[in-house]
Amino acid sequence: MKSEDVRQKSHLQFITHYTERYTYLDSARIALEGGCRWIQLRMKEAPLQEIEDIATKVKKMCRAYDATFIIDDHVELAKRIGADGVHLGQKDMPVDKARRILGNGFIIGGTANTSEQIALLAQAGADYIGCGPYRYTSTKKNLSPILGLNGYRKIVEAMQKGMIRLPIVAIGGITKEDIPSLMQTGLTGIALSGSILRAENPIEEMKIIINQINRYGKTDHCGTRI
């Protein structure tokens, strides 16, 4: 699955989160039952063995739902258990090094906050960009500068000028009320975490958000139908 295929499945990405109510496994199950078909397992401070145990279970759930399964940060683990790919932050392994380890059969996503960073990720061989934060979020430490709608508009414009056709997904404190305006900037999709799990009925919340994306998603910055 490469960038054009990623574009078709990444209009909504769910990033696992641990809360007082839900475990990482619970959060993945909720997203899948709500209709999301892209799960990123993010367990930043957990021991590797715990991550592997949970990753194996999440992978099995994703296979049952025909969903894409991405592991945050851990390149060797993604290869060992046969995940679909890996997502790399700015302080994680460089994308080009990860590509040498994984080969072309794995999806590699990269985190960016500026158009310059996106250009470097594209050059290094990333398959998609997670771009943010849209606004302040408590689910991530050491935030980059807040982008807001205007920031995304400028980044999408720069990608168009630079002929960078990678899918770009907004992340960071996004709620369902933000979806119409975000999708109109030319983004490919959005990534969610805490806003789903804080809902009274997270599964229904996921269904509502998917309907909104389908309703307001027109074409992304490459002119591709979302």
Image (tube, rainbow, N blue to C red):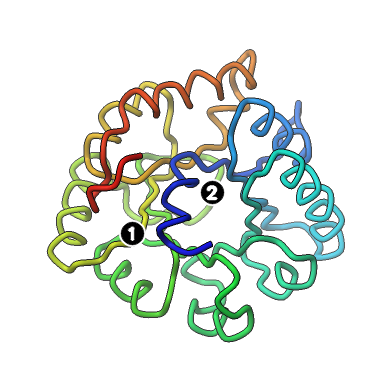
Q: Is residue 225 above or below residue 96?
A: above
Which mark sits nearer the N-terminus, 2 or 1? Answer: 1
Label at residue 221: none
Foreground label between 2 and 1: 1
Q: What percent of the width, then of the height, locates residue 175?
A: 43, 27
Q: Residue at x 53, y 28 (%)?
A: 195
Total tally of numbered discs in the picture: 2
Q: What percent of the width, then of the height, locates residue 217?
A: 32, 32
Q: Which residue is mark 1?
A: 113
**Would you identify the image quadrant in which residue 190 lies?**
top left
141 or 110, which is in the foreground?
Answer: 110
From the viewer's perspective, tell me whether residue 187 is left or right of residue 29. left
Q: What percent of the width, then of the height, locates residue 26?
A: 77, 33
From the viewer's perspective, tell me whether residue 79 is left or right of residue 137. right
Q: What percent of the width, then of the height, locates residue 106?
A: 59, 69
19 or 179, which is in the foreground?
Answer: 179
Q: Amino acid at mark 1?
A: Asn
Q: Is residue 80 above or below residue 190?
A: below
Of all residues, the one furthest to the top in this rendering is 200
Do callouts 2 and 1 mark residues in contact (Cβ within 8 Å)? no
At label 2, counting other C-alpha atoms closer than 10 Å, the crowd grade (few under 14, some 14-19, many 20 or more) is few
SS type, badge 1: loop
SS type, badge 2: loop
Q: Which residue is mark 2?
A: 140
Q: Residue at x 60, y 23 (%)?
A: 198
Q: Is residue 82 above or below residue 134?
A: below
Q: Amino acid at mark 2?
A: Lys
At label 1, counting other C-alpha atoms closer than 10 Å, the crowd grade (few under 14, some 14-19, many 20 or more) is many
Q: Residue at x 80, y 65 (%)?
A: 48
Q: Residue at x 82, y 61 (%)?
A: 52
